[in-house]
Image: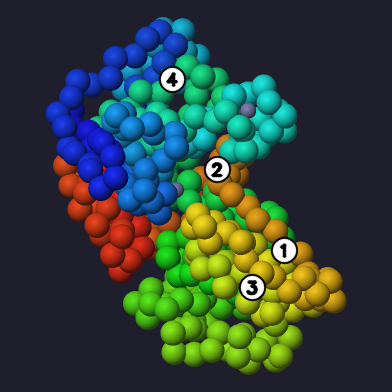
Amino acid sequence: MKAAYFYGVGDIRIEEVEIPKISEDEILIKVKSCAVCGTDLRISKFGHFKIPQGTKRVLGHEIAGEIVEVGSKVKGYTVGMRVATPPNIGCGTCPACIQGFNQMCPDYEAFGISLDGGFQEYMKIPAYAIKAGNVVKIPDGLSFEEASIAEPLSCCYNSYKALNTVPGDTVLVIGAGPIGALHVMMNKLAGATKVIAADISQDRLDEMKSLGADVVVNSAQTDLAEAVKKETNGAGANVIITACSVPDLQRQALEMAAVHGRINFFGGLPKGKEEVTLNTNLIHYKELIALGTTGSSISDYYKSLQIIASGKVNAKALVSATFSVEDTVKAFEFAAAGKGMKALVVSK
Ligand SMILES: [Zn+2]
Ligand SMILES: [Zn+2]
């Protein structure tokens, strides 16, 4: 089979390797679709602390596929079953795991990071991932391509739960990449009265309009704070999501928030730039809630799959280009160019 191995910064090689062998308590899937995530791009550029130097690793964690082999001791799964695999595998015994926050497990393993992921034709699922609930059946009628969007949607669903968007809210999403687009869709679904999307790329903003944003603001040309004021009759936004890694926007978000506004610092900041000076009097006098969310739990993932299957989030509209495993590097280049939305690595 073909597999795309990450060898180190900027070094991804396509190799012909043996199909992984499974033991009696493991599952083998044929990967049908794996979407390229910003995390994959970051790992290929900067590496990852869970991928020690000298290790080769198949990246890709937004995975959907079909079961082709089931170990004799595995229960509940059969050959031919269509499954998606939430990437973060918790230890199952720590306080975070016991409360259902497997993504917060200090000892997590993850497909595409500490385990070989989806940019290969076949993927082995270890016993502990099966036991931890990381193999989820894809609802009937949902394509593999759409199912592979469940992972990024689940991170936006986790954000939505924390922000609790309700009808009447004006939501500002800063960053019009694929994640920004999913935040727009998720908040529209939650009943937001107006969703404003902001970015400096006009291409992406144009796309955002067709994906459901009510208003788009090109912050390279227009003062974002002024635009938000205008769109909210001076009140500010009720919900603000920073789906980007620009430190100053976190500071600005507090200023653009309405009284009782909720702000999610969704995008992490680059190392060395994570200390931001915030005017905490804005939090105090406007009674703001400033919070963060990261990743998603298996529960968030499961719900996101059902949401996509319901057609209420149009995952298909996010798929901009598909590539074969052999062209994984091209898929990365497409995603890094920031033109379309999601690049998918697919196989028949
Ligand atoms: Zn992802
Ligand atoms: Zn744990």
Q: Residue at x 68, y 26 (%)?
A: 94
Position of residue 23 relative to residue 149, above or below, is above
Mark 4 belongs to which amino acid?
Pro
Q: Residue at x 29, y 14 (%)?
A: 21
Mark 3 belongs to which amino acid?
Arg
Specify whether 116 is left or right of 273.
left
Q: Earlier in the sequence, mark 4 or mark 2?
A: 4
Residue placed under numbered mark 2 in the picture? 301
Q: Residue at x 48, y 46 (%)?
A: 151
Ligand 1 within 8 Å of disc 1? The answer is no
Q: Nearer the viewer, mark 4 or mark 3?
A: 3
Is residue 21 visible to us here? yes
Residue 288: quarter of image: bottom right
Residue 185 locus on image (x, y percent): 53, 64
* Quadrant observed for ligand 2 in the rendered image: top right
User: Which residue is farthest front?
Assistant: 272
Considering the image in quadrants, where does the C terminus appear? top left
Q: CA distance from mark 4 to mark 2?
A: 19 Å
Residue placed under numbered mark 1 in the picture? 290
Residue placed under numbered mark 3 in the picture? 251
Q: Nearer the viewer, mark 1 or mark 3?
A: 3
Q: Earlier in the sequence, mark 1 or mark 3?
A: 3
Q: Earlier in the sequence, mark 1 or mark 2?
A: 1
Residue placed under numbered mark 4 in the picture? 126
Q: CA distance from mark 4 to mark 3?
A: 43 Å
Mark 1 belongs to which amino acid?
Ala
